[in-house]
Image (spheres, grey):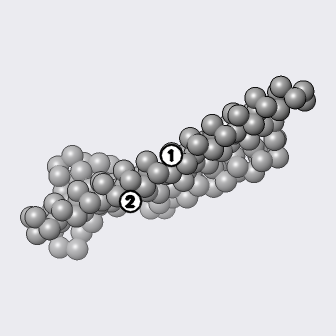
Amino acid sequence: MSEKEKTTTAAEMVQVETIIGRILQVGVVLSAIVMGIGLVLLLATGDSGYAGDTVPLTMGAILLGSWQLKSYAIMMLGTYCLILTPVLRVVVSIYAFYKERDRLYVMITTLVLIILLIALLIGLTGK
C-alpha cells in the first residue's frame, strides 16, 4: 500500500470513527428524549394507557401504542431506540473494517451483527 493510500485510509478511518461517535451520541440522546416524553406523559396523566399490569411487548403493540400516545408504549419505544443504537454502530464498524480491508474483523463483526439480530428477533417475537 502506497503512502498516499495509507493517508487516505487513515483519514477515512478518522471520519468513520467520528460518525460512530455521533451515532452513539444521537442514539442515546434520542432514546432519552423519547423515554422522557413517555415519562412526562405518565406523570401528567397518571395513566399508563393500558389496563392493570399490561405492557406492550411486541413491536407492533409498541408502535400502535406510541401512535395512540400511551406512555408505557412511548417509554418502550425509547428503550428499543437505545437497544438499536449499538446495533447501528456494529453496522458502521463492518463498513469501517471493510474499508480497511480487514477481512477477519469484517467476518467477526458480521457474526456479532447476526447474533444481535437473532437476539432482537427472539425478543420481538417472544419465542
Q: Can residue 91 be seen in this view?
A: no
Disc nearer the start of the sequence (2/1)? 1
Residue found 14% across the figure and 68% down from its top: 43
Amino acid type, label 1? Ile
State the quadrant of the N terminus: top right
> In the depicted view, which residue is nearer to us: 26 or 86?
26
Residue at the far right: name it.
1
- Choose between 24 and 50: the one closer to the eye: 24
Left or right: 70 in relation to 95: left
Taking the spot 50% from the left edge, 51% from the top edge, the residue there is 24
The residue at 21%/46% (across/down) is: 67
Q: Residues within 10 Å of mark 2 (few under 14, many from 20)?
A: some
Horizontal side of residue 37 vs 16, given as left or right: left
Residue 83 visible in the shown view: yes
Numbered disc 1: secondary structure: helix
Amino acid type at mark 2: Thr
Is 57 left or right of 17, judged from the image as shown?
left
Up/down of 10 relative to 43, above or below: above
Quadrant hosting residue 118: bottom right
Which mark is drawn over residue 54? none
Q: Residue 79 carries which label?
A: 2
Q: Residue furthest left?
A: 45
User: Rounded to the nearest whole Å, what is the CA distance between mark 2 and mark 1?
Assistant: 16 Å
Q: Is residue 36 above or below residue 8?
A: below
Tag 1 residue:
23
Residue 74, x across and y down, in percent: 26, 56
Nearer the observer, disc 2 or disc 1? Answer: 1
The percent coordinates of residue 11 (x first, y second) are 70, 34
* Residue closer to the observer: 16 or 81: 16
Secondary structure of residue under mark 2:
helix
